[in-house]
Image (cartoon, rainbow, N blue to C red):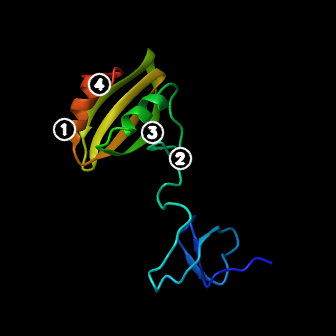
């Protein structure tokens, strides 16, 4: 018989419940949240992340290795691929272009084949990361 701790934390919805997790919820930790002594088995906010790239949705072909290299830079906090659009022209290989600065970092545009995708970089140093992208990542064009 499995013993449940006094409080259970669900990583799907962030809900604390007493005695056992609700139906359809997953138990990942179990101490009283009032004490502040909470041990969580999975790092919160990292559910869909692997090698610094959020993978909740699709990524256009050939872009993932480039995003993993960008995410490995120490000043990049997160890489979040955005929406994918179909384009009329064909790009033979993956290309990235720095589009604009955002509140949280940079927005890039990626092209591969007949698809284009927005990519958001979360960083506190957008100028330094933009310089790194232009100088070190071959797929980025100005």
Name the residue located 49 percent from the left edge and 76 percent from the top edge.
Answer: 38
The nearer-to-camera label among 4 and 3 is 4
| Earlier-in-chain disc, 4 versus 2 | 2
- Element class at badge 1: helix
| Earlier-in-chain disc, 2 versus 1 | 2
The nearer-to-camera label among 2 and 1 is 1
| Earlier-in-chain disc, 4 versus 1 | 1
Residue 31, percent from left and from top: 55, 80
Residue 127, label in figure: 1
Q: Residues within 10 Å of mark 4 (few under 14, many from 20)?
A: few
Residue denoted by label 3: 83
Residue denoted by label 2: 56
| Gap between marks 2 and 3 measured at Cα | 12 Å
**In the image shown, does 52 or 142 lie closer to the viewer?**
52
**In the image shown, does 90 or 136 lie closer to the viewer?**
136
Residues at discs 4 and 3 in contact (Cβ within 8 Å): no
Name the residue located 55 percent from the left edge and 67 percent from the top edge.
Answer: 13
Residue 36, percent from left and from top: 44, 81
| Gap between marks 3 and 1 measured at Cα | 24 Å
Quarter containing the C terminus: top left
């Amino acid at each position: 018989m499995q013993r449940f701790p006094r409080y259970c934390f669900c990583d799907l919805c962030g809900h604390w419940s007493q005695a056992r997790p609700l139906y359809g919820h997953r138990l990942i930790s179990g101490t009283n949240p009032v004490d502040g002594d909470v041990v969580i088995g999975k790092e919160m906010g990292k559910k869909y992340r692997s090698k610094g790239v959020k993978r909740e949705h699709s990524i256009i072909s050939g872009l993932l290795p480039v995003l993993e290299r960008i995410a490995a830079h120490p000043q990049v906090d997160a890489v979040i691929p955005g929406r994918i659009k179909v384009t009329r022209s064909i790009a033979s290989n993956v290309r990235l272009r720095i589009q604009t600065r955002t509140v949280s970092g940079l927005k890039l545009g990626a092209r591969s084949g007949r698809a284009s995708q927005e990519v958001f970089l979360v960083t506190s140093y957008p100028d330094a990361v933009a310089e790194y992208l232009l100088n070190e990542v071959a797929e980025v064009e100005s």
